[in-house]
């Protein structure tokens, strides 16, 4: 556990050193607008940039395509809710900005594995969108 915490800290420091300020601004904005219907073109229009450039910028900074980053952020919210509440899955899906419970479960199972228990996968951090 200590090794994992140290590794996360070092990774965070490395990210701060090499982070592109514009990429950070876009990703922060994206994180605070997960309730919107987000697309790369929409982000590009909002920031008055070329959508291909925005896509490359996000990929370079996060290692993920924009759509995967959005999905991962939503799954992170869902995991937090699974760990900290006893809310029904429908409410968790709503509060994590998924369109409906079935779509949330489909994304969750794709990220955690088809036989994964939502709470167990959240506890063990086994969520990464494919």
Image: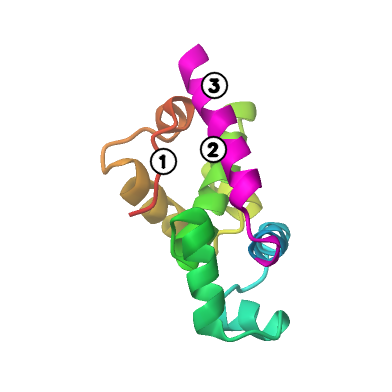
Instruction: Write the residue at 45% across / 60% down.
Output: 68
What crowding class fits label 2: few (fewer than 14 Cα within 10 Å), some (14-19), or many (20 or more)? many
What's drawn in magenta, residue-wise?
A: 1-22
Does residue 39 lie above or below 21 as drawn? below
Q: Residue 61: percent from the left, percent from the top?
A: 53, 57
Q: Residue 50: percent from the left, percent from the top?
A: 58, 86
Choose between 120 and 3: the one closer to the eye: 3
Does residue 110 lie above or below 37 as drawn? above
Q: Horizontal placement of 58 versus 49: left or right?
A: left
Q: Is residue 20 magenta?
A: yes
Asked whether residue 1 appears in the rendered view, the answer is no
Element at badge 1?
Answer: loop
Instruction: Write the residue at 40% across / 48% down.
Output: 108
Q: Nearer the viewer, mark 2 or mark 1?
A: 1
Which numbered disc flags the more N-terminal residue, 2 or 1? 2
Quarter occupied by residue 37: bottom right
* Residue on which disc 1 sits: 127
Q: Are marks 2 and 1 in contact (CB under 8 Å)?
A: yes
Instruction: Write the residue at 61% across / 30% down.
Output: 86
Q: Residue 43: percent from the left, percent from the top?
A: 63, 77
Quarter occupied by residue 115: top left
* Residue on which disc 3 sits: 6
What crowding class fits label 1: few (fewer than 14 Cα within 10 Å), some (14-19), or many (20 or more)? many
Q: Horizontal placement of 112 versus 26: left or right?
A: left
Q: Is residue 100 magenta?
A: no
Instruction: Write the residue at 71% across / 81% down.
Output: 46
Q: Nearer the viewer, mark 3 or mark 1?
A: 3
The quadrant of the rendering that contains the C terminus is bottom left
Q: Nearer the viewer, mark 3 or mark 2?
A: 3
* Residue on which disc 2 sits: 79
């Amino acid at each position: 556990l200590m090794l994992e915490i140290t590794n996360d800290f070092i990774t965070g420091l490395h990210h701060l050193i090499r982070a592109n300020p514009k990429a950070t601004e876009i990703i922060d904005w994206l994180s605070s607008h997960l309730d919107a219907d987000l697309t790369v073109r929409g982000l590009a229009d909002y920031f008055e940039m070329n959508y291909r450039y925005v896509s490359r910028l996000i990929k370079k900074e996060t290692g993920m395509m924009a759509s995967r980053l959005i999905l991962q952020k939503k799954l992170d919210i869902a995991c937090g809710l699974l760990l900290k509440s006893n809310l029904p899955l429908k409410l968790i899906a709503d509060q994590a900005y998924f369109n409906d419970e079935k779509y949330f479960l489909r994304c969750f199972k794709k990220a955690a594995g088809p036989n994964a228990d939502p709470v167990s996968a959240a506890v063990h951090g086994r969520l990464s969108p494919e």
